[in-house]
Image (cartoon, grey):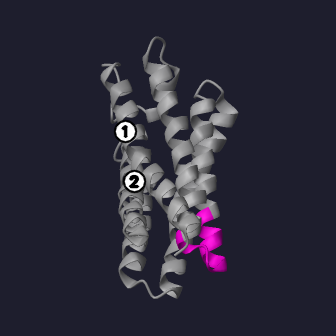
């Protein structure tokens, strides 16, 4: 492995591990700063338009973690699986997911059209990118990562299927958070494998 490839993988891995840490620290801080927030009645994005420290904290968490997710995809994931056409498509789709997350933070809920567009884009592209990446791992014969990535895609979409079919909560905070957690676990596992690949 060349030094350039090692460097790109390390940058991607650090960004990947930092993505969920940054996102969840700021999201949970924003929730803690706004006691009126309800997991069953609100969307997470409702926090982005709250006056005081809540809105800026929440929005900063989104666009900063979205930026790290973009770096993870373009530096790390592309280097790790981009040797095939499906790997390239998967990593670039995940990069677009990171951009969408950034834009959710840049365009909070009171900028209705853009916020809705980027929110739908983010939660749609995330499972799509995982399914494409599943194909990449399958073609490369990486059975464990194929299974993990497929299960992550399923875990990512299941809360939304349950939400739209059973309407188990009024707001979308629960499916949003659950979906994000599933994707984050996958990113951290893959980041660890990138680190191992450089040794």
Q: Main secondary structure of the magenta part?
A: helix
The residue to which callout 2 is attached is: 184
Q: Name the residue located 47 percent from the left edge and 58 percent from the top edge.
A: 10
Residue 45 against residue 33 in the figure, above or below: below
Residue 155 appears at what percent x and percent y? 37, 62
Mark linked to residue 24 = 1
Residue 81 appears at what percent x and percent y? 55, 73
Residue 170 visible in this rendered orientation of the protein: no
Q: Residue furthest top?
A: 52
Disc 2, SS: helix
Q: Name the residue located 34 percent from the left edge and 27 percent from the top edge.
A: 29
Residue 172 appears at what percent x and percent y? 43, 41
Disc 1, SS: helix
Instruction: Specify which label sits upstream in the sequence, 2 or 1.
Output: 1
> Hey, which quadrant is residue 151 in on the image?
bottom left
Residue 56 appears at what percent x and percent y? 50, 21
* Residues at marks 2 and 1 touching, judged by CB atoms closer than 8 Å: yes
């Amino acid at each position: 492995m060349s030094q350039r490839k090692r460097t790109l993988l390390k940058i991607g891995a650090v960004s990947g591990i930092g993505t969920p840490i940054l996102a969840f620290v700021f999201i949970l801080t924003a929730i803690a700063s706004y006691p009126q927030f309800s997991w069953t009645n609100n969307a997470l994005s409702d926090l982005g338009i709250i006056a005081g420290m809540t809105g800026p904290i929440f929005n900063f968490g989104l666009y900063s973690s979205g930026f790290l997710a973009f770096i993870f995809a373009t530096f790390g994931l592309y280097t790790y699986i981009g040797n095939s056409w499906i790997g390239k498509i998967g990593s670039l789709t995940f990069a677009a997911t990171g951009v969408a997350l950034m834009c959710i933070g840049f365009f909070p809920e009171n900028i209705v059209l853009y916020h809705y567009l980027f929110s739908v884009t983010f939660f749609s592209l995330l499972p799509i990118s995982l399914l494409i990446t599943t194909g990449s791992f399958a073609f490369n014969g990486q059975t464990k990562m194929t299974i993990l990535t497929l299960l992550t895609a399923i875990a990512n979409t299941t809360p939304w299927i349950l939400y739209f079919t059973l309407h188990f909560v009024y707001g979308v905070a629960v499916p949003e958070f659950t979906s994000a957690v599933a994707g984050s676990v996958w990113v951290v596992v893959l980041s660890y494998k990138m680190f191992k690949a450089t040794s």
